[in-house]
Image (spheres, grey):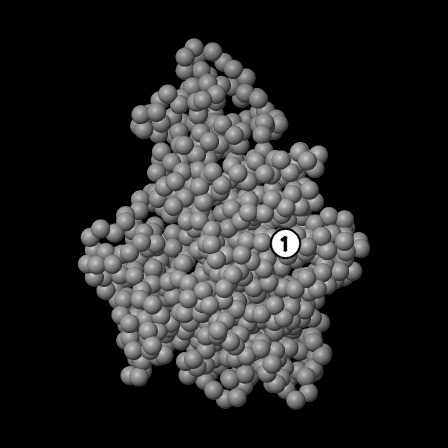
Amino acid sequence: MLQAPALFARRPDRAVRAKPAPFLPMTREEMDRLGWDQCDIIVVTGDAYIDHPSFGMAIIGRLLEAQGFRVGIIAQPDWTSAEPFKVLGKPRLFFGVTGGNMDSMVNRYTADRRLRHNDSYTPNDEGGKRPDRAVIVYSHRCREAYKDVPIVLGGIEASLRRIAQYDHWSEKIRRSILVDAKADILCYGNAERAIVEVAHRVAAGEKPRAMTDIRGTAIVRDAVPEDWTVVDYSSIDEGETTVVSPRAGIEKAVVRLPSYEQVTADKLLYAQASRVLHQESNPGNARALVQRHGDKELWLNPPPIPLETTEMDQVYDLPYARAPHPAYGDARIPAWEMIRFSVNIMRGCFGGCSFCSITEHEGRIIQSRSERSILREIEHIRDKTKGFTGVISDMGGPTANMYRLACKDKKTESLCRRPSCVYPDICKNLNTDHSSLIQLYRKARAVPGVKKIHIASGLRYDLAVRSPEYVKELVTHHVGGYLKIAPEHTEAGPLSKMMKPGIGTYDAFKEMFEKAAKEAGKKLYLIPYFIAAHPGTTDEDMMNLALWLKRNGFKADQVQTFLPSPMALATAMYHSDHNPLRPIRRVGSEQVFSAKGLKQRRLHKAFLRYHDPENWPVLREALKRMGRSDLIGPGEHQLVPAWQPVGAVSSPRGKPAPKGGKFLTQQTGQGRRMPPRDAPKTGPKTGAKAGEKTGPGRRR
């Protein structure tokens, strides 16, 4: 099995290590109080600085501090000049640049490319405090400030844009962000191992551009060394183009992806590059990848070795202040309010959903903390976090119920190339025993001073049905009225492109959930999430989903439209119109339809909100075009009425009709009173806006 040096095994950079800073300094005055004349490393971030392990800049900063380095933070600087990037002086080793906890374009724009006017990672939820493509802009300003200081990229924006990628907002293929930022090295994933090695080697005098062998990094090279064997997947043969078994006895083998120029000119080659990248994602067998950009080679080393439990504990036990920097005063920071009473118990996801970026960023091997570390954090929240009332808002991660789940055999795990451990069915080699998580829940509830622990992270219900005891434990003690889960769709076509289980699995979980709720004497509801306009979804699929929602009494309040995020498999489907989950051929590849025009994307969204009078005209028009006029009318089996509330369509900017507005029936022209818009609605609501956070470390 692959092994890596222990994360905290290196000798600290300084012979005499200073005490941890109360907060990593953001000003020269703070540096003076610490007795620092210079920072070794300065982290530039697009988020407000919150010293808590749910925020990447805090983890990396505190980790480097524990290695003996002096680390400063420049948070949300004014990017219009280089001066704000000089506020802490010149770093001795390098600038670390991140866009923050979200890709800056996802953070700033909706799936329909509309500007968002808020930013949950900014004081007072203020929008516009970071630039578009923040990693590139920040890197250029760092270079202007101190041209000879190396720049190390990290965070999710850099991670998901590490190769040539389709950019939804410009509708074109962009080069690797490492090339566009003109940085020295890129660390992808959570990157603790990579950043520690980079820092120590830079301190020893090595240039980051020369560090060609660090897992979880990307660099730019002039050429592939002559002693490396190139496995070429830069073209498409007429036959099947699956990736051959790894290494094949060759230790120095690198896989060539289609070049930036090729994927820009040929959508099939873009799908091919996406397919190969995802097949080379298992740390146990992945090979280095190379992608030509002009006259340079983008070199992508294999993914990092996952952290061991003891290392995860050490990372989360670092001396975080667990609060926003005092410079923000009493300003409200929504992202902090969301996670301040939550606990992250694990990382990674083996679900492999094609629209999700968790696997590409954190990996599919679950990295779990120990019970002791988790319980210690709960006690810390109880004792040190201002405003704690005894309620833990969440105890989860990217998913709620993958804690300590793993392949039964490490050798099998190291050889596996499946993109998902649970699709099309749960792998027979996957351990689905939830007993460790059940035990953790029980011990966490027993912590003195804890009144309630909610589970708010997204639940993987296809795993939960394998453990009736877990469902009973969850429902009896950790659900307070509603439980959010994500079937995403009801129809087989889109579900197969999402790599999600059929709706029958949801039905099985619903039955178990309701049985457990009844036994517990509780009245509880499931809140299912659905995605509109995902690749592979037709108008008929959305119509059938709307009918399912109506039959089951769901009225979606806010809904999620598919957003083609960088590097996701679903994004490759959206851009290329082909399925990278299947072999890519010039003739015979599986084609995938995607709703791309704004009109059709809004129609798909309207089906999810079939109950909103604002959507009735477009739905009636679509149903007539589809030959389904039988669904127009007042019947329970019909989707939309034939009448329209006065003012619902003609009101400015699509605003709803006023309270007490009037309906006119097409049949008689007689008026009907419309119920007030704030009147209670029957049945629970469902849905989420794009980008809503569903648990510590996870974004949908």
Where residue 481 appears, as percent x and y from the top left, is 66, 38
Where residue 457 appears, as percent x and y from the top left, is 59, 50
Q: What residue lies at 28% left-to-right and 72% top-to-bottom?
A: 231
Q: What residue lies at 62% left-to-right and 39% top-to-bottom?
A: 482
Along the line of sight, the residue nearer the viewer: 180 or 453? 453
Q: Can residue 112 be seen in this view?
A: no
Q: What residue lies at 47% left-to-right and 43% top-to-bottom?
A: 488
Q: Can residue 19 be seen in this view?
A: yes
- Horizontal side of 381 relative to 211 (left or right) equals right
Where residue 57 appears, as percent x and y from the top left, is 58, 67
- Horizontal side of 370 relative to 196 (left or right) equals right
Q: What residue lies at 47% left-to-right and 51% top-to-bottom?
A: 426
Vertical position of residue 386 compared to residue 690: above or below? below
Where residue 365 appears, as percent x and y from the top left, is 51, 63
**Residue tagged 1:** 435
- Horizontal side of 242 relative to 619 (left or right) equals left
Q: How crowded is mark 1: few (under 14 residues within 10 Å), some or many (20 or more)?
A: some
- Total count of labels: 1
Vertical position of residue 304 compared to residue 371: above or below? below
* Callout 1 secondary element: helix
- Horizontal side of 499 relative to 235 (left or right) equals right
Q: Pick out the residue farthest to the right.
A: 448
Going by the numbered disc 1, the residue's amino acid type is: Ser
Vertical position of residue 591 compared to residue 154: above or below? above
Vertical position of residue 202 compared to residue 479: above or below? below
